[in-house]
Image: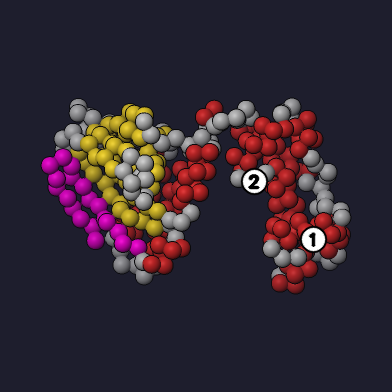
Amino acid sequence: MESLFQGVSVESSRIIYTPSGFARANLLHLQEVGELRAIKPHTSSRKGLLSFLFFIVTQGAGSLFYDGQRYLLNPGDCVFIDCRRPYAQSSSEDRLWSLKWAHFYGSSMNGIYEKYVERGGRPVFAPKEPKAFTGLLTQLLTVAGTEDYIRDMRINEKLTGLLTLVMAESWHPEACPHTGVKKKTLQYVKAYLEEHYKERITLDHLASQFYLNKFYLARTFKEQFGATVLGCLDQIRITHAKQLLRFSDLTVEAVGREVGIGEPGYFSRVFKKVEGISPGEYRRMW
């Protein structure tokens, strides 16, 4: 149920949400969503919340204190933080702000936030398209206020969309420790793997091909794409192998050779590692 709140410092429209047991166990789930307008300067502070907070400044200005650092916030600026850590947010005295926000959690959130930070994601960022974020938060507020019988699934969908936008803004190589390879170069490396997957490729070969230190290449490639260089190569090869297993009459051994994994036993091991079943089982299933 949406509540209209007129306080001493803010006017707000919010929904304090109670997800189902199914949603708590299996989905990204909402705790609170809303929007507010400051009517006088104010500060909100929290600590120890089992929650992650995302908010965007739609008007005015303010500041965030988080992890020992103060950040100035202006219209269009976004905040994404782990609320188990102490934080405080304050509206500017002369430019009273308006915000849209969501508190949410899920069993996957710790890993998602760690990946966000690992990629150089910051507590505060200025997105290229602020309207995409405000639009999703508005949709979340609308969905949370409905009686839709699959409401928790729809909320999970919107939160996933929000996190996808957030993660797209997170790549800051200059903020990542031990990162010396630019994003553009890594995209060329990945494109090379997709084009030359049939060939014998090693980390040393790629480092030489792109004039990179192989240890930097290995580390930063995993940070950006979420898989090792050779793990990504395996995924590319297995994707092509699956197509051949389904839509050709080639033997399993021939499929392995066609995608660059010539030894039959090794091809089967790689396929099972990626898919969880053998190439023959995959072909029979499909």
Type of amino acid under label 1: Ser
Q: Secondary structure at mark 2?
A: loop
Percent position of residue 181, x then y: 63, 29
Image quarter of residue 270 = bottom right
Residue furthest out toward the left: 8
**Furthest residue in direction front, as rendered:** 48
Q: Residues within 10 Å of mark 1 (few under 14, many from 20)?
A: some
Mark found first going from the N terminus, 1 or 2: 2
Range of magenta residues: 1-19
Name the residue tied to disc 2.
227
Label 1 sits on residue: 268
- In this picture the colour scheme is secondary structure
Residue 231: x %, y % from top left: 70, 48
Using the numbered discs, state the Cα–Cα distance from disc 1 to disc 2 in whole angstroms. Answer: 20 Å
- Element at badge 1? helix
| Count of residue discs | 2
Left or right of 120 in this view: 277: right
Q: Amino acid at mark 2?
A: Ala
